[in-house]
Amino acid sequence: MSEADSSARVVVYTRPGCHLCAEAIAIVTAVASEEGADVLEVDISGDPGLTERYGEEIPVTIVDGRPHAVWRVDADRLRDALRAGPGARVRWWRRSRPTA
């Protein structure tokens, strides 16, 4: 299922073996559960178009169809975005690339 086919408010693009993806999914599912929001996890590894689009910038978290976070998800910021609703203007940001 793709983001466009989903009614999920939160979409997280991931790939197997990605430790940041596992961390992001844990935070997203916990916060979304608290807020009653559906989550869709999309594995980019089976889709060449998604792999080209997101490459190494995963996980990517989308909230209400808008970019929300790359690499790391802040639980409080996600909670605020979900409470604000689909039409709200919530600034999206990207933390610096994590070090290995």
Image (cartoon, rainbow, N blue to C red):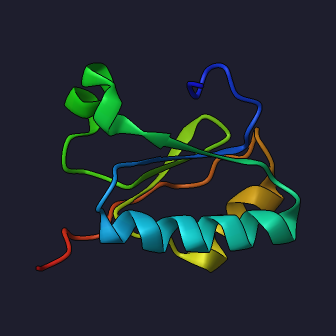
Q: Is residue 69 left or right of residue 50?
A: right
> Is 84 drawn above or below residue 63 in the view shown?
below
Residue 79 visible to the viewer: no
Q: Residue at x 57, y 72 (%)?
A: 26
Image x and y of residue 22, in percent? 44, 68
> Where residue 29 sits in the image (x, y, percent)?
68, 65
Q: Nearer the viewer, residue 89 or 36?
A: 36
Residue 95 vs residue 61, the one in the foreground: 61
Q: Is residue 83 left or right of residue 39?
A: right
Q: Is residue 2 left or right of residue 69?
A: right
Q: Position of residue 37 (x, y in %)?
A: 81, 53
Work out which quarter of the rendered image holds the N terminus and state it: top right
Q: Position of residue 35 (x, y in %)?
A: 85, 65
Looking at the image, which is closer to me, 97 or 11? 11
At x 38%, y 55%, the residue is: 59
What residue is at 35 percent from the left and 37 percent from the top?
Answer: 44
Front-most of residues 24 and 80:
24
For the C terminus, which image quadrant? bottom left
